[in-house]
Amino acid sequence: MDCPRCRTANEPDRQFCGECGAPLTIECGRCGFANRPPAKFCGGCGDKLAAGPPAKERAVAPAGGERRQVAVLFADLSGFTRLSAELDAEEVHRLLGHFFEAADAAIERFGGTIDKHIGDAVMAIFGAPVAHDNDPRRAVHAAQEIHRVVGDLETTLGRAMPVHVGIASGEVVASGTGSSRHSEYTVTGEAVNLAARLNDLAAAGETLVSESIHAAVADEVESEARGATAVAGMPEPVGVWCIRAVGAARRVPRGR
């Protein structure tokens, strides 16, 4: 795209101009969506965009074992085991590639970090190694974007690929984890386990979130309370909410 300051042509994936260093995206201060100039309203939530460079992020070195407050997102394909039994291995591999490409792009669009791919699931972190003041909101918007882009992918591929998502927040330890032979930056803590369990509980097309995530986004979502729910590995039932719509698409929340 052309730089709005010096008009130099830049590659589509660049965030800053290679000639003058000007930002090539306008980050929404509400949901974190990366918009292309000269957009005046956010493509992620519809909020009016502030002029100027993206909001400043707090970068943190990915080493040392640091306690961080994060939102963790898990997303995977519903019925993947059945799909694997029905299709040739190469076709399954191709579908997974399309899914990860779409999901990863949606996550990064809202400022999240891809932690890992596990089978047909993607795990993402919002808040490490880069923190924002609205990471729970970013995670919820990313989840809705994943549902949308994978829905578009279903049309393109001519095959149903429903996704279910789980999101939780809390304090984790962020560090390089592994052995002397292999180590990678990741987070560990109860929020990771809860997000994975919520992902397991979510039905096709659903996003289930923890009580803390819902509290952070309650003013901009249509949601349904699932009440205190027994979750495997958790000592007590936890409050669970299902996100039905975000932003302009929402109606009056149910169960609030």
Image (tube, grey):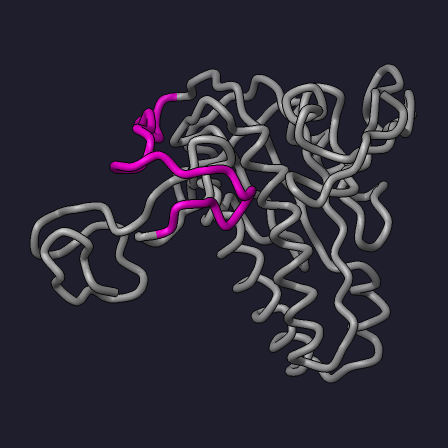
Residue occupying the point 8% across, 56% down: 19
Q: In which image quadrant can residue 212 be found?
A: top right
Residue 113 makes an appearance in the image: no
Task: Name the quadrant of the C terminus.
Answer: top right
Tell me how many marks there are.
0
Q: What stretch is highlighted in magenta?
A: 39-64
- Does residue 106 appear to the left or right of 202 in the view shown? left
Name the main secondary structure of what is drawn in magenta.
loop
Q: Is residue 157 above or below residue 39?
A: below
Residue occupying the point 66% across, 30% down: 220
Q: In which image quadrant can residue 81 be found?
A: bottom right
- Does residue 39 appear to the left or right of 156 in the view shown? left
Image location (x, y in percent) of residue 109: 46, 49
Image location (x, y in percent) of residue 75: 68, 49
Residue occupying the point 83% across, 21% down: 239
Residue occupying the point 66% across, 48% down: 144
Residue 71: in magenta span = no
Residue 82 makes an appearance in the image: yes
Image location (x, y in percent) of residue 198: 78, 36
Image location (x, y in percent) of residue 200: 81, 44
Q: Is residue 199 above or below residue 55?
A: below
- Does residue 237 appear to the left or right of 9 in the view shown? right
Residue 52: in magenta span = yes
